[in-house]
Amino acid sequence: MRRGPEGERGGSAVEFALVLPVLMLILFAILEYGWYMTHQLTLANAVAAGARAGVKVRDWDPENPGDPEEEARRVVREGFWLFDLPEGNIQTDAEVRLGPSGARMLEVKVVDLSFRSLTGYLPDSLLPRRLSAKSLSAFP
């Protein structure tokens, strides 16, 4: 093993100590944004599944009775498997929209859902703390 000059002892440790915080910030940023995107994509998929399930239920059809809005809420709660959604965060709205087809629409959205950080090391300015998703489906 080769030894360096006597005046450079511990230089590698100092360089490592200077670079380590930057590397840790990059590592935690990757983990946090991955966790955030997992939550956002799972929420968007759950809301879309809720809207699809809601339009399949028709309160006027004797073969498939039920409340479309309640079915949509149930499917959204089941589809968001990361944690339990508070009931107040799921909003549904079934109404007749004026448009070229005049179709009855079901809008399902989750608004202002608090996001729980994985590590907690990133400040609020670098990572969103709220999730939201919206889906709009037409009744057949």
Image (cartoon, rainbow, N blue to C red):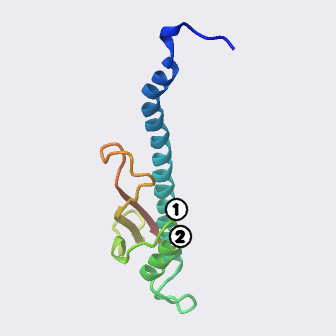
What residue is pinned by disc 1?
45
Q: Amino acid at mark 2?
A: Gly
**Residue ID at (38%, 66%):** 110
What distance separates the C-alpha of mark 1 from that of mark 2? Answer: 7 Å
Q: Secondary structure at mark 1?
A: helix
| Mark toward the start of the polypeptide (1 vs 2) | 1
What residue is pinned by disc 2?
79
**Residue ID at (35%, 75%):** 95
Give the vertical position of 42 relative to 78 (above or below): above
User: Between residues 8 and 83, which one lies in front from this camera angle?
Assistant: 8
Task: Tell which residue pokes out farthest to the top in this image.
Answer: 5
Q: Which mark is residue 56?
A: none
Q: In terms of image quadrants, where is residue 25?
A: top left
Binning the other alpha carbons within 10 Å of mark 1 as few (below 14), some (14 to 19) or many (20 upward) gives some
Residue 3 placement (x, y as % from top left): 62, 11
Residue 138 placement (x, y as % from top left): 46, 69
Residue 112 placement (x, y as % from top left): 32, 63
Q: Are marks 1 and 2 in contact (CB under 8 Å)?
A: yes
- Indicate the quadrant containing the N terminus: top left, top right, bottom left or bottom right: top right
**Residue ID at (50%, 68%):** 80
User: Between residues 124 and 20, which one lies in front from this camera angle?
Assistant: 20
